[in-house]
Image: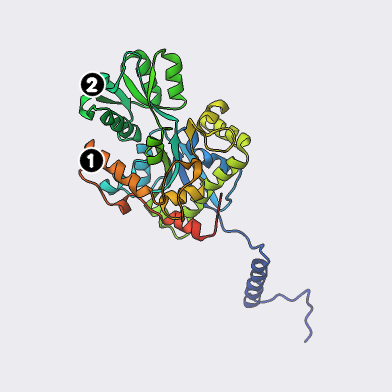
Amino acid sequence: MTYSIRGYMPGRAFRLGMTVALLAVFAASGIARAAEPVTARVSLFSWPGYAFWYVAKEKNLVPEVNLDIQIIEDPYQSFALMSAGKLDVASSTAEYAPLASAEGNPVRLVANTNPSWGTDKIIVRPEIKSAADLKGKSVAVLEGGLTQIYMGIWLENNGVSIKDVKFVNLVMDSAMAAMLSGQVAGGEFWEPYGRNVLENLPGAKVMANSATPYWSKTSLLGDAMYMREGFIEQKNGAAALAMKAYFAGVKYWREHPTESNKIIAKALGYTVADVEAIIGADGKPLKGGIVVYGLKDAGQFMGVIDGDPTMANLGQTHGQIKDHFDLTADWWVKFGLIDKKPPFEGGVSLKPMQELVASGYTAD
């Protein structure tokens, strides 16, 4: 019997074999259908130092990951959502790792992303001449944040106990208003709030500046990336892909600073001038602002990549994250937030960065 090719209807086994063969050909040729992108739920508060996520999303720099970004002004709300499994990644200041470890929260610091290089200042009202004048008075800080530690170290270095002042927990808008009205005698301010205080309160004085070597070398004042433990342990590589997207955003910003700063300003509701005052206009470290780390410097600070961080030559060292963890943990004990120094591994995970570096990706 002779069969017409046109009329022949092959059986299931034949069709399955042909499908497998065709997929193999497509895969070999590099045109196989890409897997669905993984989703990373990301939060940040409205600060340009975190907003490279928006650059990565706007330019679709890592198509393998879908960035679902939201602004949450209270970092502790972000950490609570991470603990509840409703958020995967958060950009915030770099002091929470010891608290997460002490409390057993499934939140891990996975990268230090920038040190402050002048954007953070301790400012006092005109009538305050020295740290000693603050005894018995109120100072504005974010309690449980780096600003409280910054103020505490500065006070003690100048002979004033942290018990001699009243710490008032205020976000930046409220802190600025309290400073101008005289409700607080001093406070810690980052830009653009510090500049606004100085411009609107004649005689106000800067008593400490994060650009000085004492502060910049410790990298006490800086930002970090946090991830949920369950997100880190996912088998689809989502954590490394999310980190890749962030550092790809940094790389694009360095190469296209004008375009990127406009993206950041629009996303945060800032003016471009205010963005530039914090992260710079040319993609380079900004004295008076922050030093934006790429993957190499961040990896060196975390101890994952060989060598010392050299961006802006602040004197930081390989694996300095452990010193930073110890410094912040000691102060949280002093402030009574925790009873004793907790284990480093309970608050920091090197796994996402190790996986990203092992993949061969470089963003510098």
Colouring convention used in this rendered image of the protein: rainbow
| First in sequence: mark 1 vs mark 2 | 2
**Which one is in front in this view, the residue at disc 1 or the one at disc 2?**
2
Residue 231 point in image, percent of width and height: 42, 53
Q: Check disc 1 and give the amino acid type.
A: Val
Residue 362 point in image, percent of width and height: 55, 54
Query: Would residue 120 be found to the left or right of residue 347 on screen?
Result: right
Depth check, front residue: 319 or 254: 319
The residue wearing badge 2 is 135
Is residue 107 shown to the viewer in this render?
no
Q: Residue furthest bottom?
A: 1
Q: In which quarter of the image is residue 159?
A: top left
Dot 2 alpha-carbon crowd within 10 angstroms: few under 14, some 14 to 19, many 20 or more: some
Q: State the count of labels.
A: 2
Q: Check disc 2 and give the amino acid type.
A: Lys
Query: Would residue 281 be found to the left or right of residue 68 on screen?
Result: right
Residue 101 point in image, percent of width and height: 29, 48
Q: Residue at x 74, y 76 (%)?
A: 8
Q: Quadrant of residue 56?
A: top right
Q: In this view, does 107 lie above or below 173?
A: below
Is residue 340 shown to the viewer in this render?
yes
Depth check, front residue: 158 or 104: 158
Q: Residue at x 60, y 32 (%)?
A: 262
Q: Is residue 363 above or below residue 6?
A: above
Dot 1 alpha-carbon crowd within 10 angstroms: few under 14, some 14 to 19, many 20 or more: some
Dot 1 lies on which element? helix
The residue wearing badge 1 is 333
Dot 2 lies on which element? loop
Residue 136 point in image, percent of width and height: 22, 20
